[in-house]
Image (cartoon, rainbow, N blue to C red):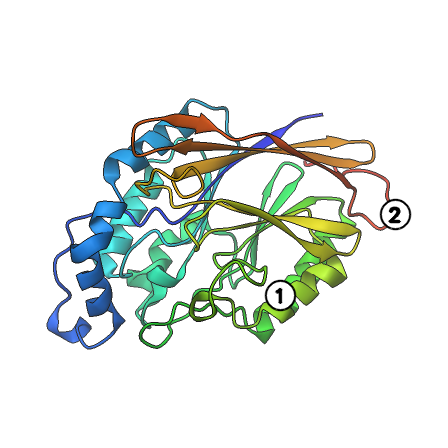
Amino acid sequence: MNTITIAHLSDPHLPTEMVPPRVGERLNKRMFSYFSWKGRRRHLHRPEILAKVMADIATCPVSMIAVTGDLTNMGLPGECRQARRWLEQMPAPCTVIPGNHDTLVYDRWPQTLGLWQPWMGPLPFPFVRRVGNVALIGVSSAVPTPWFMATGTVGTRQAARLRDILRDTGRQGLCRIVMIHHPPVSGLAIRRKALTDIQDFDSCIATEGAEMILHGHTHTSTLSSLPGRMGPVPVVGIASASARSCDPLRAAGWNRISVTPHDAGYSLHVVRRFFMADATTGTGQETIFDLPSPSQCGSGVSTPA
């Protein structure tokens, strides 16, 4: 049976020499983020490191690239246009969701996040994109928040829709991989950066199940789990794709996720590639998850047309 390979990356914070926000954009969080970028973050998120990550992905046979948010630093229209150009140059098909930096304030959809809609599924969120026997489910936790807060919220309407999508794709026997920016596991993010309605999201997973959850936001590569309908659901986080760090868990990287169907369900193989500030390239230990078919009848996998 065919293997689907997904490249998971997050938080590229596309490095750019940003101009200061215009007068009408100054009296909000964007100005604070601008000063943060000019003072510290531009030294942490480097274009040459992001280029190494993307070049490494380009050498692998990848079915889909999954980007779990924070493409920008302030969510300005100019940054969103730059991010669109970056998406247009992807070495493989790409699916993207927004992060908190992409939605620092309320702004016009067509001039900001709407520019990325070709790399999303049919809206509203959560959307679904089908890649063979894999259903990529894009959840948005990105909402504007007060100063010094970077929390995320899914919301009741999106949670209800997520339940329906998980149930329907599960009945089809698809491998359901959920994309969300904020980590849905308690303790992975401090309170001012956490998911505010984490219990509602986790309830969806516990009731309907999923095969894997991908996230970013913490700029740290992590592996955890949530209770699911048929057992623990792997939750995989990845460091910023442009991060300059000597810590292997915080150094820029990407996850190579191989999904192989078999008679009883799916085998998911996860390997992390990372790029240290000292130019060292590393490969994390392969983690294998052997998961039962999500279909209620347990009859295996639906075959894509």
* Residue drawn at point x = 36 percent, y = 59 percent: 114
Horizontal side, residue 182 vs residue 132: left or right: left
Horizontal side, residue 219 vs residue 5: left or right: left
Picture coordinates of residue 60, whole percent (x, y): 47, 24
Horizontal side, residue 42 vs residue 220: left or right: left
| Three-letter code, disc 2 | Cys
Q: Nearer the viewer, mark 2 or mark 1?
A: 1
Asked if residue 153 is positioned above or below residue 98 in the image, the reply reads below
Q: State the quadrant of the C terminus.
A: top right
| Number of marks in the rendered image | 2
Per the image, label 1 sits on a secondary structure element best described as helix
Picture coordinates of residue 170, whole percent (x, y): 74, 51
Asked if residue 54 is positioned above or below residue 210 in the image, the reply reads above
In primary-sequence order, the first of circles 2 and 1 is: 1
Q: State the quadrant of the N terminus.
A: top right
Label 2 to label 1: alpha-carbon separation: 25 Å
Picture coordinates of residue 234, whole percent (x, y): 65, 47
Q: Which mark is residue 243?
A: none
- Residue 173 is drawn in which quadrant? top right
Q: Nearer the viewer, residue 212 or 4?
A: 212
* Residue drawn at point x = 74 percent, y = 55 percent: 228
| Three-letter code, disc 1 | Phe
Q: Residues within 10 Å of mark 2 (few under 14, many from 20)?
A: few
Residue 204 in sight: yes
Q: Which mark is residue 297?
A: 2
Q: Which residue is mark 1?
A: 201
Picture coordinates of residue 273, whole percent (x, y): 46, 31
- Residue 112 is drawn in which quadrant? bottom left
Q: Nearer the viewer, residue 113 or 29?
A: 29
